[in-house]
């Protein structure tokens, strides 16, 4: 009789021991053991499901059952949050499940660089790197109420954008991005730089406007202080800036070359018709151009044109006669190049 009672108890105890052992093994496997072969970056959208994440991780997961079990335990299906997540080889299954459920994002880089001369380009560049769609970005850059909170308008928004690389969460809002731009703008406009601007009779916005013209004129950074010096000399003498990039801006940068017919456009941005600076920047000024305006070369040049060597440099002149000769030599070289092509 006693034996018949003890056998079931022993079997139950054995079953419990086995269950406890399985539980302990699974616990250690899920919580302590690395479960990934290599680093994998996940982009989780609002519509992404836990099943889709498991599928995308399948190629790098060592123990798929452990990961699926951890997803169920942490209810990832019901708690998953959008974001950019980096799964590393040292991560356990439970850590990745909690990371997705808790929204523990890994920051990425937002790179603002290159030619940024229209809001559509800026919108696409940001959209390609963040969860934001380009329409949302473009709308923000034209939102007078939103921009006024940063001290800018749709006409001056280019001055707010500071080209650089920013560490940000992929799900950042446009307000988050503008906050970072304003912080970078304020950092650039230190007391020292404000004094330099004041010494040239310019406000920070006017520096940005002139720097945008310098940016539009050349990508050859060694010459930017010399080009800035030309325009500052013209401003001091009360001459019209006569900057081709401002005319190109009037035509959304569509003309490959500025012709006499373009110079007649009736726009406050046409510096061939209007004296002084245009009402706003014509593109996002580079930091090199901003620094060139604040630290220009001191010289007597009033004119410059592209070099006939086609190396990105320019020829500078103090008189219109000298400038005209330089312009003829460039045109002759350009015609010869076209005939040879």
Image (tube, rainbow, N blue to C red):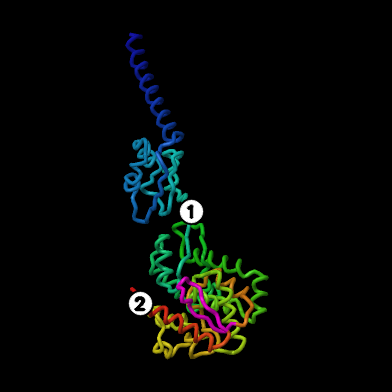
Callout 1 touching callout 2 (CB < 8 Å): no
In front: 144, or 233?
233
Return the residue at label 1.
107
Image x and y of residue 148, in percent: 52, 76
In front: 202, or 105?
202
Q: Which mark is residue 338?
A: 2
Query: How far apart are the alpha carbons under marks 1 and 2?
Result: 49 Å
Magenta span includes 116: no
SS for tag 1?
A: loop
Q: Bounds of the magenta span?
A: 301-317
Image x and y of residue 233, in percent: 60, 83
In the figure, residue 171 lies in which quadrant? bottom left
Residue depicted at x 57% and y 65%: 184
Q: Is residue 255 above or below residue 239?
A: above
Q: Quadrant of the N terminus?
A: top left
Image x and y of residue 52, in percent: 32, 48
Which one is closest to the eye, mark 1 or mark 2? 2
In front: 281, or 331?
331
Magenta span includes 312: yes
Residue depicted at x 48% and y 65%: 113
Q: Quadrant of the C terminus?
A: bottom left
SS for tag 2?
A: helix
Q: Earlier in the sequence, mark 1 or mark 2?
A: 1
In front: 75, or 196?
196
Residue depicted at x 45% and y 84%: 328
Q: Is residue 223 above or below residue 8?
A: below
């Amino acid at each position: 009789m006693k034996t018949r009672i003890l056998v079931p108890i022993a079997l139950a105890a054995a079953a419990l021991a086995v269950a406890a052992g399985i539980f302990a093994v699974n616990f250690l496997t899920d919580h302590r053991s690395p479960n990934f072969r290599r680093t994998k970056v996940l982009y989780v959208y609002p519509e992404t499901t836990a099943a889709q994440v498991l599928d995308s991780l399948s190629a790098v997961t060592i123990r798929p059952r452990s990961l699926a079990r951890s997803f169920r335990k942490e209810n990832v299906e019901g708690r998953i949050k959008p974001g950019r997540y980096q799964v590393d080889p040292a991560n356990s299954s439970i850590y990745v499940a909690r990371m997705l459920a808790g929204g523990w994002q890994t920051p990425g880089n937002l790179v603002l660089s290159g030619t940024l001369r229209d809001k559509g380009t800026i919108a696409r560049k940001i959209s390609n790197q963040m969860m934001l769609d380009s329409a949302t970005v473009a709308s923000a850059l034209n939102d007078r109420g939103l921009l006024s909170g940063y001290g800018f308008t749709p006409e001056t928004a280019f001055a707010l954008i500071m080209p650089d690389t920013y560490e940000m969460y992929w799900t950042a809002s446009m307000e988050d991005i503008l906050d970072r731009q304003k912080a970078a703008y304020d950092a650039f406009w230190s007391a020292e730089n404000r004094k330099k601007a004041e010494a040239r009779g310019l406000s920070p916005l006017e520096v940005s406007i002139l720097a945008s013209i310098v940016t539009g004129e050349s990508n050859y950074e060694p010459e930017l202080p010399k080009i800035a010096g030309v325009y500052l000399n013209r401003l001091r003498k009360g001459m019209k800036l006569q900057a081709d990039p401002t005319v190109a801006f009037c035509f959304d940068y569509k003309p490959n070359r500025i012709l006499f017919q373009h110079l007649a456009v009736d726009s406050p941005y046409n510096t061939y018709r209007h004296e002084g600076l245009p009402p706003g920047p014509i593109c996002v000024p580079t930091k090199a151009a901003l620094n060139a305006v604040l630290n220009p070369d001191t010289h007597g040049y009033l004119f410059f044109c592209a070099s006939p060597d086609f190396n990105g440099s320019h020829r500078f002149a103090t008189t219109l006669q000298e400038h005209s000769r330089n312009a003829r030599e460039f045109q002759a070289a350009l015609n010869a190049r076209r005939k040879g092509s």
